[in-house]
């Protein structure tokens, strides 16, 4: 049967935007595949106190305010005394724990993810850990054509200068006489999450909403490891408002990467999905990002808006999973980069 070969697919460079939204499951999947360099674990809200080492601080909190769920405990403390010095101590302890985390030397899922997209695309994450930013930085040594990023709940990797309205690595100065990038808040009370209280967070959400909007030429959206928790209704509402109704997104393709059964995922994200225009994968390497890296939108156009038989039957170009070094990963992506450079010169 005729169709676009793998090589022809590599050389097909088009527009369209792919938005990827990351939750805790993405970082957990990344560290299960490749452990954090010093062996540090990513906590859940149920083992957060023990993993991060907050037992001494928690011991000072009245018993009536405590909970096995850390997010609930923090919310209880904030509601009772929003000026409690314990709140600041908790923030500092979290910054220290997550801030010392580092990617291992070998390629991780985050390296694959960063390289699967281009500068026209966008990654937004709810995670505090520094892994996404670290992967972005080290892959800049290979190509500058990488996706934009938004940190929706803040991150331990980046700070913000209110004076300069800019973000950058915590502790760095954006100019000689000042402009230090200060840490941004990481925790918000469970019942009072307000994404308008911090300029860094506001900018992150505004960028994502602009990218999600139906006029932004976004044709694919992938949710990776984000469960849309009931504790974060405001975030889900913001996403839904930006995306619009399923009828307004009748031609876009929605993807969920999660270990949760498909039926449950279909129900959870029903307000984002038009009819059959969705995909579900239980691993990153089964997703559109891994099957057609840097050509996810081209693949979409071929399968759903094909003008010819050749386009409709397009061969995938799945990235191998067994690279041991970044250099091996980069070498595999080089033909894709070369094709993009040729396309930009021919415009």
Image (cartoon, rainbow, N blue to C red):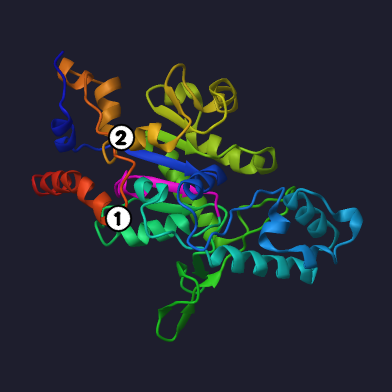
Compared across the picture, whether 111 is left or right of 45 comes to left
Q: Which residue is mark 1?
A: 326
Compared across the picture, whether 64 is left or right of 240 comes to right
Where is 257 relative to 170, above or below? Answer: above
Q: Is residue 153 magenta?
A: no
Q: Position of residue 39 (x, y in %)?
A: 54, 59
In the image as oriented, which residue stretches furthest toward the bottom?
177
Residue 218 in view, yes or no: no
Q: Position of residue 81 (x, y in %)?
A: 83, 63
Q: Position of residue 238 (x, y in %)?
A: 57, 41
Q: Nearer the viewer, residue 321 or 271?
A: 321
Frontmost of labels 2 and 1 is 1
- Identify the mark nearer the N-term, 2 or 1: 2
- Mark number displayed over residue 296: 2
At 54% from the left and 55% from the top, the residue drawn is 202
Tag 2: Cα neighbours inside 10 Å, few (<14), some, or many (≥20)?
Answer: many
Q: Nearer the viewer, residue 331 or 128?
A: 331
Residue 112 in view, yes or no: yes
| Image quadrant in which the C terminus is located | top left
- The magenta span reads 114-127
At 77% from the left and 49% from the top, the residue drawn is 72
- Mark number displayed over residue 339: none
| Image quadrant in which the N terminus is located | top left
Tag 1: Cα neighbours inside 10 Å, few (<14), some, or many (≥20)?
Answer: some
Where is 224 relative to 125, above or below? Answer: above
Could you tell me which secondary element the residue under label 1 belongs to? Answer: helix
Could you tell me which secondary element the residue under label 2 belongs to? Answer: helix
At 47% from the left and 83% from the top, the residue drawn is 178
Q: CA distance from mark 2 to mark 1?
A: 22 Å
**Image quarter for residue 79?**
bottom right
């Amino acid at each position: 049967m005729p169709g676009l070969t793998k090589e022809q697919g590599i050389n097909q460079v088009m527009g369209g935007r792919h938005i990827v939204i990351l939750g805790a499951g993405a970082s957990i999947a990344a560290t299960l595949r490749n452990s954090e360099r010093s062996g540090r674990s990513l906590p859940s809200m149920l083992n957060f106190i023990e993993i991060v080492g907050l037992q001494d601080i928690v011991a000072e909190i009245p018993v009536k305010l405590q909970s096995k769920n850390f997010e609930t405990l923090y919310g209880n403390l904030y509601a009772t005394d929003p000026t409690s010095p314990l709140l600041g101590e908790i923030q500092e302890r979290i910054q220290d724990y997550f801030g010392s985390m580092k990617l291992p030397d070998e390629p991780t899922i985050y390296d694959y993810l960063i390289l699967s997209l281009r500068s026209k695309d966008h990654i937004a994450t709810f995670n505090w850990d520094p892994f996404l930013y670290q992967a972005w930085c080290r892959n800049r040594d290979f190509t500058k054509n990488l996706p934009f990023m938004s940190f929706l709940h803040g991150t331990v990797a980046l700070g913000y200068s209110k004076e300069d309205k800019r973000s950058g690595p915590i502790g760095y100065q954006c100019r000689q006489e000042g402009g230090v990038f200060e840490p941004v808040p990481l925790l918000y009370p469970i019942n009072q999450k307000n994404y308008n209280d911090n300029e860094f967070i506001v900018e992150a959400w505004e960028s994502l909403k602009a990218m999600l909007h139906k006029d932004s030429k976004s044709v694919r959206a992938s949710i990776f490891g984000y469960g849309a928790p009931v504790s974060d209704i405001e975030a889900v509402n913001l996403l839904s408002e930006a995306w619009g109704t399923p009828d307004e997104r009748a031609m876009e393709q929605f993807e969920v990467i999660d270990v949760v059964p498909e039926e449950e995922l279909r129900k959870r994200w029903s307000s984002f999905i038009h009819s059959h225009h969705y995909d579900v994968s239980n691993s990153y390497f089964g997703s559109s990002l891994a099957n057609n890296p840097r050509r996810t939108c081209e693949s979409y156009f071929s399968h759903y808006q094909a003008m010819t038989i050749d386009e409709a039957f397009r061969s995938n170009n799945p990235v191998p999973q067994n690279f041991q070094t970044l250099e091996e990963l980069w070498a595999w992506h080089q033909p894709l980069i070369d094709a993009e450079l040729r396309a930009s010169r021919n415009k």
